Image: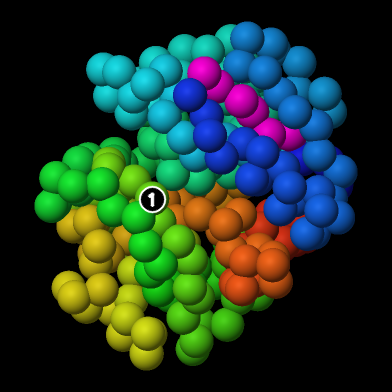
Amino acid sequence: MKFGVVTFPGSNCDMDMIHALEHDLNFKVVQLWHKDRDTQGADVIVLPGGFSYGDYLRSGAIARFSPIMESVVAHANGGGRVFGVCNGFQILCETGLLPGALLHNESRKFICKNVHLKPVSRSAAITSELPNEEPLTIPIAHGEGNYFIDNDGLKALEQNDQILFRYCDELGQVNSWSNPNGSIDNIAGVTNKTKNVFGMMPHPERAASSDLGNTDGSAILAGLASLVNA
């Protein structure tokens, strides 16, 4: 399984993601530049966190037009897997590969802290093997992580089992107190209908090493290579 990690101007989590995938999980990883169109045979393409193009206009709105994104969209439309974290999630929503949008945090402040996540979808590869009785502890670092979708879209997500994660408390209870940014229905990550494109705001690559004192994120990243729905 080969992973390709894209670097945009302003990406700052690309090397974190590469290190987690290559050194902590022993996957083969290639670096992809935003101006290129060649995905170098990557089975999974990852859009990392950061501030692509300085978050000018709107987070992910300019990166959506980078040359590499033509290949990313083609890869996804052909059934290939794509994973976006934080800014990468924003970019995937801007391209329309994932439903919904990421708005400014309800507090209007940048938030950087550990949160608890409850895996939801049982049919998506990235979450199918995660235990949902114990919450995962994963860091967030964003100013625009407030996930929004209209009521019809929310119903579709629920009906199609497209909700990957919900913010919860340390006991796994989903409530308003555990929602860090105002996201509708405490949603922290979603997948598309065919479940080959995944996006989430929290950073699993920052919780994938014993050196960091947290390996909860490694199980999420390993799910990208799962054969479920392959």
Of 156 and 121, the residue lying toward us: 121
Residue shown at the point (46%, 81%) measured from the top left: 135
Tally of numbered tags: 1
Against 150, is 119 above or below?
A: below
The x, y position of residue 46, in whole percent, is 63, 38
Find disc 1 in the rendering and name its residue.
141
Against 228, is 107 above or below?
A: above
The x, y position of residue 119, in whole percent, is 48, 72
Looking at the rendering, which quadrant does residue 102 occupy?
top left
Residue shown at the point (81%, 39%) measured from the top left: 29
Of 155 and 64, the residue lying toward us: 64
The reply to whether the magenta stretch includes residue 130 is no
Asked which colour scheme the image uses, the reply is rainbow
Looking at the rendering, which quadrant does residue 104 occupy?
top left
- Magenta highlight: main SS: strand
Against 55, is 174 above or below?
A: below
Left or right of 103: which side holds 116?
right
Residue shown at the point (86%, 43%) measured from the top left: 28
Determine if residue 52 is in view. yes
Looking at the rendering, which quadrant does residue 159 occupy?
bottom left
Q: Secondary structure at mark 1?
A: strand
Mark 1 crowd level (few <14, some 14–19, many ≥20, 10 Å Cα):
some
Of 51 and 63, the residue lying toward us: 51
Against 120, is 159 above or below?
A: above
Residue shown at the point (29%, 53%) measured from the top left: 111
Left or right of 55: which side holds 198?
right
Tell me where the magenta segment starts and ends, as one range. 4-9
Left or right of 218: which side holds 186?
left
The x, y position of residue 96, in whole percent, is 41, 30
Determine if residue 148 is in view. no
Q: Amino acid at mark 1?
A: Ala
